[in-house]
Image (cartoon, rainbow, N blue to C red):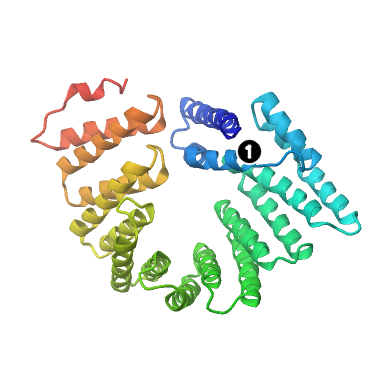
Amino acid sequence: MAQEYFRILRAAADQDIADKKSEVERLKNHGEKNSQEFFKSINQLDKLRVAWDSARIYECALFISGINSDRALQVVKDALNKMVEEGGVVGALRILNPETLELAYRDARKMKPITQLAIMQVIEGYEFRASLLEPQYKYAEIAECYEIMASIFQKELKDQEKAATNLIYAAMYRGHNGEFQKQLEINQKALNIRKKALPADHPDVALAYNNLAAAYGNLKLCQKELELNQKALDIREKALPAGHPDIATSYNNLAVTYLKLGNPSKALETHEIAIRIFEKSLPADHLDLALSYENLAWTYKQLNDYEKAVAYSQKAFGIREKTLPADHPDLKTSFNNLEWCYYQLYDYAALIDIYLRMATIQEKTLPADAPGWFYSYSTLSQMYEMSENIKINRLLFKNAG
């Protein structure tokens, strides 16, 4: 069943992406290539591709296949049947709407006594709805599901930890949706719950501080972000074994904040501590290590040390090249950072090499009309013209049209 649900979700993903690509193409054909709307659509297309990552789709499919239809709410059963019947999620979401779930919650509360099973059935309905919305880039609606689940856990089941966990997810999706003030307020609620329910030095309290710091960072309140990241680090260093990756994460977060505050020397010192821990505690191809390399490269850029910036950007790109799909924004970030550094160093041969690698990745994994194609090949042409020692290889342009 998981494979069947994966197929359905994958088909819906492909349709969403195709619709967005059509919108991008329409704007381009109408002379809107430099308009704000065009770039907004390109950005949304990138986010859709990430949201519809196959691993995430499979995670959603596994959750759906794990629903026990014998004990599920009738609305959940109907939504499951509609998914299979239509081979899509539109009908299922129409059935599994907020009003119907709210009604199911009211009915469960009318039961005397209210049973945990009845309440958990309602929560499962909201989880099901969130899993269908997750790959559709509908972050505000997903956040609402988690906010309601948090309220139910707190009011009906008196489970403070699950209430806080759901609030953290809600805050994350509010952040994804650009609602940074709401993200901050919800993370503050989660922190307050955990501070009451857990010891002050519990790692989950540190995580709550970490999430709240990120919300302050999104609001450009960097001094407050620094203060909360330091609190998270203090707790983790006391509660976790030396060399734990979460400690490195806190150092990494602190370093990023130091850089925002205009202190690249302190950021460099702190990043190097994070790197040392990550390199000992994580696999060599771990994405957290790639992020740390990328952050360190950015710090060296601020210090105008482009040689070291290139070295760490290359490490980040190498990991992401192996582990991420060709259209993933993080891979493009590494590519753009390397491009920028090579330009500063006037290293056109290296620029050609990185463009060739990116074009090869795209050629293997993306359709020929994907937005990245023209950019890579047209820029390669410019690089060859700028480099006096390298001749243009005409075969390079066989797919450029």
User: In the rendered view, does 214 fall on the left or right side of 287?
Assistant: right
Q: Dot 1: few (<14), some (14–19), or many (≥20) neighbours within 10 Å?
A: some
Depth order, front residue of 29/322? 322
**Residue pictured at 51% horizontal, 62% vertical:** 218
In the image as oriented, which residue stretches furthest toward the front?
A: 70
Horizontal and vertical percent for residue 98?
76, 45
The residue drawn where x is 65% and y is 74% is 197
Is residue 137 among the parts visible in the rendering?
Answer: no
- In the image, 24 versus 157, the foreground residue is 157
**Relative side of 118 to 198, left or right:** right
> Picture coordinates of residue 366 (x, y %)?
39, 29
Q: Quadrant of the N terminus?
A: top right
In this rendering, is residue 210 above or below 342?
below
SS state under label 1 = helix
Quarter of the image for the C terminus: give it.
Answer: top left
Q: Disc 1 residue type?
A: Ser
Residue annotated with mark 1: 65
Q: Is residue 238 above or below residue 300?
A: below
Spot occupied by residue 236 in the image (x, y as percentages of width and height): 45, 74
* Residue 181 seen in render: yes
Pick the front one: 55 or 312: 55
> Is residue 155 left or right of 379 when viewed as pictured?
right
In the image, what residue occupies the spot 20% across and 36% down? 383
Q: Where does residue 113 sit, x and y in percent of width and height?
A: 89, 59
